Image: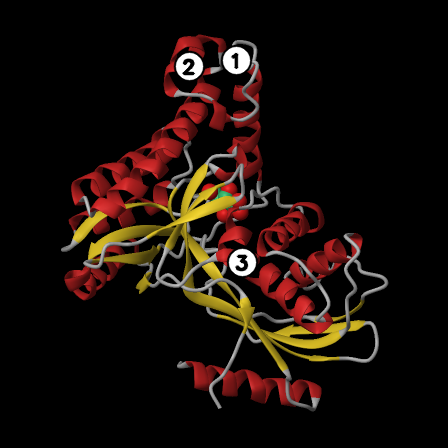
C-alpha cells in the first residue's frame, strides 16, 4: 500500500466511524536496534534506527473532554474522559493512549479531546516497538492539538517511557521512545542512554539492514525482562562495594568485573559480562560502520548473538533456525537478535546487491525448518515522529 492508498483507507474508515473527515495527522516510527540488547536501562549505549514502518494517527478535535480512539489493526477501542482516565482491561492497547494522556496531564500539559483512528505498519510483538510508536504518536498529536506546548523531543520520549512504566506496567528503558521521537532519515543513532544524547552514524552504501521476523511472539510484561533488569541491578550493587562510584553497569569495565566476579552469583556475573561487552560492541560498531569494515561488523554481530544466547539467555531456542538460515544465506554480512529477545526479530546486515536472493533464501529455509512463514524485508532509516504532511 502506498501512502496515498493508506491515507484514503484511513480517511474512509474515519468518516464511517465518526461521520466527518480527520483534520490532523501524525506519525511515529518503529525502531530496530543494530547493536545494544538491554543496554538502555544499564545507562549504556545503543545503536538504533527509526524504520520506515510506522504508526499513523488521524484525528479531529472535539469540543468536550473526551477521547474516542479506534484502530484499523486491532479490535476494540472506545471512549474515555480526560478528567477520569482509567485502565482499560477490555481493549488493553488503548492503555498506551490513556497512559500518555495521564502522564502529560500530571506534568501540567493542557490536553484537548479528540476523535482518533490509528493505523500501524509496525508488526505487533515482534520487537520493533509498536508500543512506543503508539505512545509517541499520541504525544505528538496531543501537542499538535494544543499548539501551545513547548516540549523538546527528548522530554517527550521520557514522558512516553514513563507512561509505559507507570500506566502500562512494563518497566522498559528509554530506547524505543527515544528512537521513535528522534529518529533521522538516512541515519542510525548512537544513543547514550545516560546523557540522553546521540550522534548519527551512516550505514555503508553497499549494505542493507534486513529484518528477519521469526513470527514467534514475545510477551514482555512476562517475568523475564524484569528478572534481567533485577540481575543487572544486583550486579552493580555488589560491585559497588569495590567501586563505589559505579551506579550502573555502564560504569564498569570488563577488567573490573573479572577482578571481582567471584563475589557475584554465577548467573548475575554472566548477565553483567554480557552488558559490559555489548556496550563496547555498540561503540565498536559505530567505528566499523564508518569504516565500512565488514569483517568487524560480522565479528561484532556474532559476538552480540552468542552473548545474547549464552550469557544473557534471551534467545528462544525456537529462533535458532532463523539465525542458521541467515548465516547460510547469500549476501549475509552479520546478524543478531533485535529488541528484547525471546522470539521476535533478528536484524541482519546484508550486501545490498544480494538483498532479494537473501530474503528468498531465508524465507524458504526457515519455513522448511519450522513450518512458520517468516517476514523478511529491508528497512530504511526514517525520520522521527511528527505531523504528517500530504502533498496536495
Ligand atoms: C525493549 C524495551 C527497551 C530495551 C529493549 C532491549 O524493547 O522496551 O527499553 O530494553 O527491550 O534492548
Q: Position of residue 367 (x, y in %)?
A: 27, 59
**Which tag, 2 or 1, sits closer to the chain's start?**
1
**Circle 3: element type:** helix
Q: Position of residue 374 (x, y in %)?
A: 33, 60
Disc number at residue 243?
1
Q: Quadrant of residue 379?
A: bottom left
Q: Is residue 242 above or below residue 115?
A: above
Q: Quadrant of residue 66?
A: bottom right
Judge whether residue 198 can be spotted in this image: yes
**Depth check, front residue: 154 or 356:** 154
Position of the N terminus by quadrant: bottom left
**Circle 2: element type:** helix
Within 8 Å: ligand 1 and the Cβ of disc 1?
no
Q: How is the image coloured?
A: secondary structure
C-beta proximity under 8 Å, tags 2 and 3: no
Residue name at image x 18 percent, y 44 percent: 293
Residue name at image x 43 percent, y 12 percent: 261
Would you call the spot at circle 3 few (<14 residues within 10 Å), some (14-19), or many (20 or more)? many
Residue at the disc numbered 3: 181
Would you call the spot at circle 1 few (<14 residues within 10 Å), some (14-19), or many (20 or more)? some
Residue at the disc numbered 2: 256
**Which tag, 2 or 3, sits closer to the chain's start?**
3
Amino acid at each position: 500500500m502506498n501512502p496515498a492508498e493508506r491515507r484514503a483507507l484511513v480517511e474512509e474508515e474515519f468518516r464511517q466511524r465518526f461521520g466527518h473527515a480527520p483534520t490532523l495527522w501524525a506519525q511515529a516510527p518503529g525502531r530496530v536496534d543494530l547493536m545494544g540488547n538491554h543496554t538502555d536501562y544499564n545507562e549504556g549505549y545503543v545503536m538504533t534506527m527509526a524504520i520506515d514502518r510506522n504508526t499513523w494517527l488521524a484525528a479531529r478535535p472535539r469540543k468536550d473532554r473526551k477521547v474516542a480512539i479506534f484502530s484499523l489493526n486491532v479490535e476494540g477501542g472506545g471512549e474515555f474522559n480526560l478528567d477520569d482516565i482509567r485502565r482499560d482491561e477490555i481493549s488493553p492497547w488503548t492503555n498506551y493512549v490513556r497512559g500518555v494522556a495521564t502522564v502529560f496531564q500530571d506534568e501540567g500539559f493542557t490536553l484537548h479531546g479528540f476523535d482518533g483512528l490509528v493505523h500501524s505498519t509496525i508488526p505487533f510483538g515482534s520487537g520493533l516497538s509498536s508500543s512506543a510508536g503508539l505512545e509517541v504518536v499520541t504525544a505528538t498529536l496531543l501537542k499538535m492539538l494544543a499548539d501551545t506546548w513547548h516540549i523538546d523531543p527528548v522530554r517527550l520520549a521520557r514522558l512516553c517511557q514513563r507512561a509505559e512504566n507507570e500506566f502500562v506496567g512494563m518497566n522498559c528503558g528509554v530506547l524505543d521512545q527515544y528512537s521513535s521521537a528522534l529518529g533521522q532519515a538516512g541515519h542510525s543513532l548512537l544513543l547514550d542512554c545516560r546523557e540522553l544524547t546521540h550522534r548519527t552514524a551512516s550505514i555503508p552504501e553497499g549494505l542493507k539492514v534486513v529484518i528477519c521476523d521469526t513470527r514467534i511472539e514475545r510477551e514482555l510484561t512476562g517475568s523475564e525482562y524484569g528478572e534481567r533488569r533485577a540481575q543487572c541491578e544486583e550486579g552493580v550493587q555488589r560491585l559497588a562495594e569495590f567501586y563505589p562510584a559505579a551506579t550502573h553497569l555502564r560504569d564498569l569495565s570488563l577488567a573490573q568485573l573479572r577482578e571481582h566476579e567471584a563475589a557475584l552469583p554465577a548467573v548475575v556475573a554472566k548477565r553483567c559480562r554480557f552488558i559490559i561487552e555489548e556496550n563496547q560492541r555498540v561503540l565498536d560498531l559505530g567505528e566499523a560502520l564508518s569504516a565500512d569494515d565488514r569483517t568487524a561488523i560480522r565479528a561484532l554481530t556474532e559476538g552480540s548473538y552468542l552473548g545474547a544466547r549464552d550469557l544473557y539467555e534471551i534467545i528462544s531456542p525456537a529462533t535458532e533456525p532463523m539465525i542458521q538460515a541467515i548465516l547460510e544465506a547469500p549476501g549475509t554480512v552479520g546478524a543478531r537478535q533485535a529488541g528484547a529477545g525471546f522470539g521476535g526479530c533478528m536484524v541482519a546486515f546484508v550486501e545490498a546487491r544480494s538483498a532479494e536472493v537473501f530474503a528468498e533464501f531465508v524465507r524458504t529455509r526457515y519455513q522448511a525448518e519450522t513450518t512458520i512463514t517468516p517476514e523478511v524485508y529491508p528497512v530504511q532509516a526514517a525520520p522521527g515522529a511528527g505531523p504528517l504532511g500530504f502533498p496536495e
